[in-house]
Image (cartoon, rainbow, N blue to C red):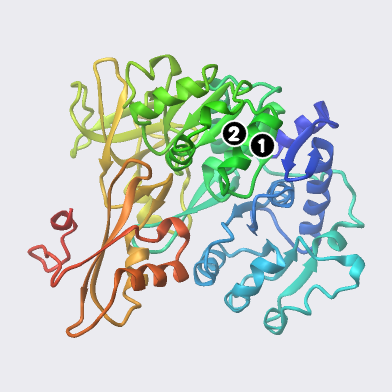
Amino acid sequence: MLLDHFLAHSAARHPGKTALICGDRRATYAEVDEGANALARAYLALGLKRQERVCIYFDNSVETVQGLFAALKAAGVFLVVNPGVKGDKLAYILGDCDALILVTGRRNLKPVEAEVAAVPGLRHVILVDYDAEAGEDPGSAFPVLRAAGKDVHGLASLTAAQPRTPPANPNIDLDLASLIYTSGSTGTPKGVTLTHLNMVAAATSITGYLANQEEDIILAVLPLAFDYGLYQVLMAFKFGGTVVLERMFLYPGRFLELIAREKVTGLPIVPTILAILLNLKDLEEHDFSSVRYLSNTAQALPVHHIARLRRVMPKARIYSMYGLTECKRVAYLPPELIDKKPSSVGIAIPNTEVWIEDEEGNRITAPWAPGELVVRGSHVMVGYWNKPEETAKCLKAGPNPHERILRTGDLFKQDEDGHLYFISRKDDLIKTAGERVGPREIENVLYELPQVREAAVIGVPDEILGQAIKAFLALADGAILTDLDVIKHCQNRLEKFMVPRHVEFRPELPKTNTGKISKKGLA
């Protein structure tokens, strides 16, 4: 099975059923499928070849969903990039994966026009919000792009004459379906390469233990650029459910209103969202009677949060989970054990094998002994795009000659029953609010400040975020800089979740024997 079959099969079974609810807009499966078919044919008309990349740089929307499924239907590879990503990082990603087509909106494109224009391999930009009836020239507002030889198209006019039937798709499940870019330890993003088989296997496993059904209505507020958000749509389309797709979690009141109004049955959240909700005084007064399950990833839920959830959502099954982009999901705690083992992230998901290894690669069988978690399964990525050395660090030969397994870089321990407990990252990547952040990327931005002599970033424990980002700075002699200056600079250069929560100034940062900054000394 291919990933795009999720949409095609659900559209064939339930053409008139609502697939997506986005604000006041409701799109049926037939509408989403036919729109994706027409856009797929438009991609092909623009010259997209098998396994070439299409980047969607837009908010959660019907058009974003159609854009990614269109890439799959055209035998291409899609990537969704958060529209909060700055121009230099977007340009790096587009250049790294050699994207042919960028799908975006006018408001999103304008601040990054110069950087996008400089990407050599990019040939076409499609504007989802171009108004063809107004007689506008889609490229007139983007002279820098036009001067660089990029063709700018309006989505509606591009697809108007295209058939609403799917084009022929020669792909098999070993072909790539998606790239998901995550922060890298070197300071540059890494593209996680995922095949159709990888993503279908992950979706099948997760919807199995969640016991999803056609009647499920999922409230998705996380960006589709984040794999946890993306999979809410993919999985719902697999079983024929409905997704209430919000751009982001901004207003708790609207979140609660949507749950009651749309009779939401599934709530995928991260600890940050939950902490905000549980801080509301009147939470018990809201209607959660429709909620069948709540899923949480990034960290185990605090015990007092579980107790409050029990009171406000007595019918909901609570799933605590652990995963990473390189294989989507690793473990889940069966809901009946959440009171008994609240700090555990559970057991391996179906069709997955996990174990813990010591530094020499030997399996650890003793209960509570720490080691690195290793994952074996058909959902494990192919590798990092264009980064063979980075790939070799985390993928190694498996128990059988034909396979590779994933070293997660995370330290875990297991209890006597085999349930997993997260300890920490093996390297210094920070996991904050469900996102993995490479400290080097933030440090590079900090070094842009002329007052900064030395900079180091680490994660510190935080009950809401899992880890909060803390920056340590040593300033040049006589230089003056405040923590507000630092935070404002980072806000202008980084995505919101990467901005340090804490800033500490020191005369000197601790060093190792080789002269490198010692992050262990800072921690």
Q: Position of residue 489 (x, y in %)?
A: 40, 72
Q: Height in image: 186 above or below 277?
A: below
Residue found 18% across the figure and 85% down from its top? 478
Q: Is residue 183 left or right of residue 64?
A: left
Residue lying at the far left of the rendered structure: 513
Q: Quadrant of residue 320?
A: top left
| Residue type pointed to by label 1 | Leu
Q: Is residue 423 left or right of residue 466?
A: left
Q: Which residue is mark 2?
A: 200
Q: Position of residue 53 (x, y in %)?
A: 63, 58
Q: Is residue 444 left or right of residue 520?
A: right
Q: Position of residue 428 (x, y in %)?
A: 27, 52
Residue found 73% across the figure and 39% down from its top? 20
Q: Quadrant of residue 138?
A: bottom right
Q: In the rendering, which numbered label is found on residue 433?
A: none
Q: CA distance from mark 2 to mark 1?
A: 7 Å
Residue contact between numbered discs 2 and 1, judged by CB atoms under 8 Å = yes
Disc 2 crowd rating (10 Å Cα; few below 14, some 14-19, many 20+) is many
Q: Which residue is mark 1?
A: 2
| Residue type pointed to by label 2 | Val
